[in-house]
Image (tube, grey):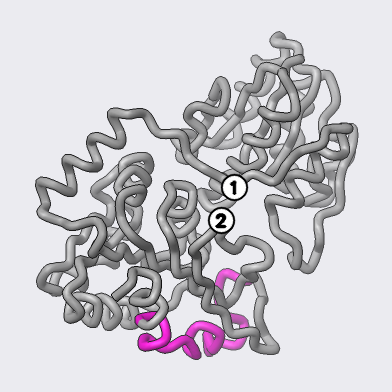
Amino acid sequence: MKVLVRTPNWIGDSCISLGFLRSLEESTAGEVFLLTARRVAPLFKGFGKIIEFSGRRELFERSLSLRKIGFDLCFVLPPSISSAISASLACSGEKIGPEGEWGRRIFLTRTMKFDPHKKRHLLLEYLDLLCAEGLSPKIRVPVLRFEDREIEWARDFLLKTGIDPAKTAAIAPFAAYGSAKEWGIERFLELAGKLLDKGLNVVVMGGQSDRARSEPFKGLRGCLNLVGKLSLRESAALLRHISLLVGNDSGATHLAVCAGARVVAIFGSTSPRWTGPLGEGHRVIYKALPCSPCFKRECPLGTRECMESVSVDEVLEAVLEAIGN
């Protein structure tokens, strides 16, 4: 059997979907192909044959070219109509995915209704797609698959920079989805300063688009700013060795979880019941206010109270407890 998986577009959702792919491998002996956006493709290394695309036009062109492979089954994880269209172009067999955007149903052979209130973890929703096909998946924690050379590179990098991984906390202040998810640069700066005062190393993580916003961290002596300087897999390999990462409900936080690091995850506009860190040793800080979770990119009230109510000392205490200081 040949199986096609249209993977999520966001880094965080892609990381969570690695648990789905692990379960898929265990549930079927089929050959797995992954149709994935180029920017998140490195996350899926080792999980199947990867077909990359950038933009909707290339997505449809690649999808149409894949039809000759003769897929028996296609799982469509993103909720967009474009992902459903691409599945119909690529696969003549069964096509299953969440209901998602209006109009998707005509392009899929079966749709599943995900919890509209997002009170059930996204991984469990993904696994329901396997159950719908008569498979019996086990819940597997999402993990990245590293090559030995990547692990060695991270060790050498830390050695050259003089950082003791056991006494290091990474911080990820940014969230690509929108400002409603962000705890705030000022708070992360204050937290970094207090961690440095405690004798810990601090590494700042983020993507290329965050470089300008990360400039204030360069003023902190002893703080290593790596924002925009590492590839996705280099960041993950480094996080694999570091004790802990503090971040929002963001791609960097989910990347750390999949890399094997512990996280202190700050939630506000989104729900930890939907995308909380999976596995042991993690800590979630979440104020269940009447207005949260709203799942908006920007705070509808303009107050960001769900994030503003989380104090620096509260996060500091969680970090020190997790690291063992």
Using residue 175 as the reference point, say whether residue 295 is left or right of it.
right
Q: Neighbour class for label 1 at 10 Å: few (<14), some, many (≥20)?
A: some
**Quadrant housing the N terminus:** top right
Span shown in magenta: 296-316
As drawn, 123 above or below 168:
above
> Which of disc 1 and disc 2 is earlier in sequence?
1
Amino acid type, label 1: Val
> Which mark is drawn over residue 206?
none
Q: Nearer the viewer, residue 63 or 12?
A: 12
Task: Kindly identify the residue that appears in the image at 40 percent across and 65 percent down.
Answer: 174
Marks 2/1 in contact by CB < 8 Å: the verdict is: yes
As drawn, 81 above or below 279:
above
Task: Kindly identify the residue that appears in the image at 41 percent across and 55 percent down.
Answer: 261
Q: Where is residue 263 shown, x and y percent of the image?
A: 44, 64
Q: Where is residue 35 shown, x and y percent of the image?
A: 61, 29
Which residue position is annotated with label 1? 141
Using residue 159 as the reference point, say whether residue 97 is left or right of it.
right
Q: Nearer the viewer, residue 256 or 115?
A: 256
Amino acid type, label 2: Gly
Q: Neighbour class for label 2 at 10 Å: few (<14), some, many (≥20)?
A: few
**Quadrant housing the C terminus:** bottom left
Question: At numbered mark 2, what does the secondary structure look like: helix, strand or loop?
Answer: loop
Q: Is residue 79 magenta?
A: no
Which residue position is annotated with label 2? 279
